[in-house]
Image (cartoon, helix red, strand yellow):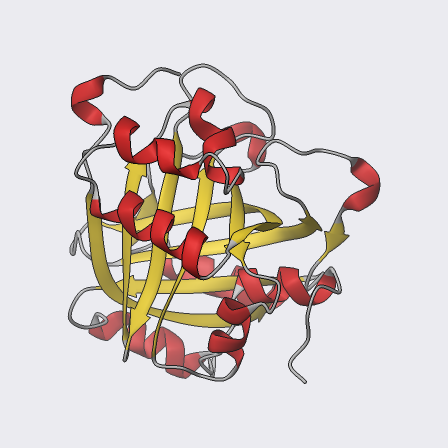
Amino acid sequence: MNIDTSEQSQLEKFSRYEFKYVLNSQTRKHIEDEISHFMRYDGHVHPELKNRYFVRSLYFDNDLYSHYHEKTDGIRSRKKFRMRTYGREFQEGVPIYFEMKGRHIDRTYKHRVAIDFDHIPLFQDPKQVFQLLDIYPNNWLIEQFVYDTLRKHIKPCVLIDYLRRPYTSDYDMNFRLTFDDSLNACPSSELFYNDPNSWRQCISGYCILEVKFHRRIPAWFHKVIQANDLRRRSISKFCEGIEYCGLADES
């Protein structure tokens, strides 16, 4: 996939609230049955994946796992970098993004830029990372990543895969639900790494429900939360992957 020069510095920005819940299969089914009256799948699902789509993220951290500990310590202003795509192997036309995901107090934000497959090695090698400044000129996200690579010594460390079933609202375009399951992780410095012996299954038998909104949760979904006695969880796929792979722990 080749990115036009005019698009290489185009930075996308997102900001919203995200509440997370961990569901067993029975609760998940009950909730999906209820929301089907108000929401529908978004346009990216695949019938052969049971109306889900595949997500792969390669996360960056340093040898001290500073980003991991910022999350587990509950630091309210934090960020981390990741590379994201939607296939286990490179395919023409499947997008690859470089992203910074963060939180400030209770609000989450994400900045991302589409990147070229041929540039992936530059993100993975601190000795070559400077070249990204010329390839993606005047891009604040790339500048921040280069700085953190050189000063904080971050590097790719863990690969996270999962399947996502997304719902959008017919009544509120800013309200979105995603059910993420089949979470797997492995230590890796490569985005398209697929050694079957390296993977670890995470939170088996459960899914993560993410509730995403800009200002408020609709009243009808508040009733769903109350009826199912849902309790918010401070859970991170990145941290789960780090722990299941034995790369770091909360101690």
**Number of residue marks:** 0
- Which percent across, then down, holds residue 171? 16, 54
Is 177 above or below relative to 156?
below
Who is closer to the viewer here, 117 or 167? 117
Who is closer to the viewer here, 81 or 185? 81
Residue 174 occupies which quadrant of the picture?
bottom left
In the image, what residue occupies the spot 34% across and 33% down? 132
Location of the C terminus (image quadrant): bottom right
In the image, what residue occupies the spot 56% across and 61% down? 62
In the image, what residue occupies the spot 37% across and 37% down? 130
- Which percent across, then down, holds residue 183? 63, 53
Is 50 above or below relative to 177?
above
Who is closer to the viewer here, 100 or 221? 100
- Which percent across, then down, holds residue 50? 55, 37
- Which percent across, then down, holds residue 215? 15, 70
Could you tell me if residue 14 is visible in this image? yes
Farthest-out residue, right: 197
Could you tell me if residue 51 is visible in this image? no
In the image, what residue occupies the spot 44% across and 80% down? 232
Location of the N terminus (image quadrant): top left
Is 229 above or below relative to 119?
below
